[in-house]
Amino acid sequence: MASAASSLSSHQGNERFNKEAAAWDSNPFVHQMSAEAAKALEKYIPGLGGNSTGNLDVLELGCGTGLLSFMIAPKVHEVVAVDAAQGMIDVLETKIRKSDTKNIVPVCVLLEDPEDPSLPPADRNDPTGPRQKYDLITSHLVLHHIPDLKSVLKTMLACLKPGGMVGLTDFEDFGPEAKRFHPESKMAGVERHGINAEWITDLMQEVGFQNVQVKVAWEHEKRVERWPGEFKPGVPIGQDQGEKMNFTYLLCMGQRPS
Ligand SMILES: C[S@@+](CC[C@H](N)C(=O)[O-])C[C@H]1O[C@@H](n2cnc3c(N)ncnc32)[C@H](O)[C@@H]1O
């Protein structure tokens, strides 16, 4: 089992996401980026694209309000959508109640243990038995919040069925300028300024993933602060504020050995 320090940076990050949950979906950026992530996953993950049979069991780690979960759900058997912030899960539960999508299972858990009792059991008639294993684990804009990535990658590996895959998307650490992705007011819970392709490839291989492939899946121009603190929390960004900067996004894929 991983140490308590291995996941979301303590309560700082959790507090931030609980606070932001109610207004999360009002930000067009998070919708656009989830749509890009869904497109990349459909393109590269076998069983998720056009002719797929819709039988994958998916775990989404750090689902937030379920933006990506809702996009993937019609193409798969089930999405178990986990997030450490209860505020995010509350919003997701409300959205599920109001929708026709019934194959998303929301779970509030800081995922560190593949056998965490709050995860669904493999046999739904045996609630205390071993936990379910997955064909695919997704995680979007989450890796940069995790202090001990090695430990969480190990957890993911242990949550997969033999031959199952991860498809993890996050912005790329292309150098010191990547720090500008987050405005000063959103630095709580940020552990690193993006994901470095070489470093994550090595780490995934070290943890035991096979067929590791890390590729730039899309790019996007984001409005960033010209100086730290330029954007005020809760105040819409004015046309005359900030400047545009291009960010690349990585899709990190790897497979559990069969
Ligand atoms: C930047 S938000 C992204 C939310 C969502 N994926 C989206 O793009 O809208 C990161 C989320 O990851 C969650 N998180 C981080 N580490 C986690 C872990 N180990 N287990 C569960 N949730 C985690 C946080 O609570 C937060 O809601």
Image (cartoon, grey):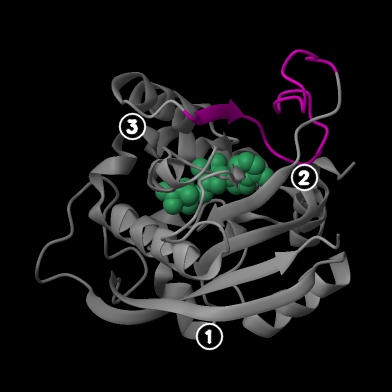
Q: Residue at x 72, y 75 (%)?
A: 212
Residue type at numbered disc 3: Ala
Residue at x 29% of width, y 37% of height: 23
Q: Which picture quadrant has residue 241?
A: bottom left
Q: Which stretch did the figure color magenta?
A: 103-128
**Disc 2: residue Cβ within 8 A of ligand 1's nearest atom:** no
Q: 85 or 81, which lies in front?
A: 81
Label 2 SS: helix
Q: Which residue is mark 3?
A: 22
Amino acid type shown at disc 1: Phe
Considering only vertical position in the picture, is 130 above or below 72?
above
Give residue 163's quadrant in the image.
Answer: bottom right
Q: Amino acid at mark 2?
A: Cys
The residue to which callout 1 is attached is 174
Q: Name the residue rendered at 46%, 69% in the picture.
A: 43
Q: Residue under label 2, please give it.
A: 159
On the question of residue 50 being in view, the answer is yes
Q: Where 197 sits versus 157, above or below?
A: below
Magenta region's main secondary structure? Answer: loop
The Cα–Cα distance between marks 2 and 3, rounded to whole angstroms, is 29 Å
Q: Mark 2 or 1 closer to N-term?
A: 2
Q: Position of residue 25 (x, y in %)?
A: 29, 42
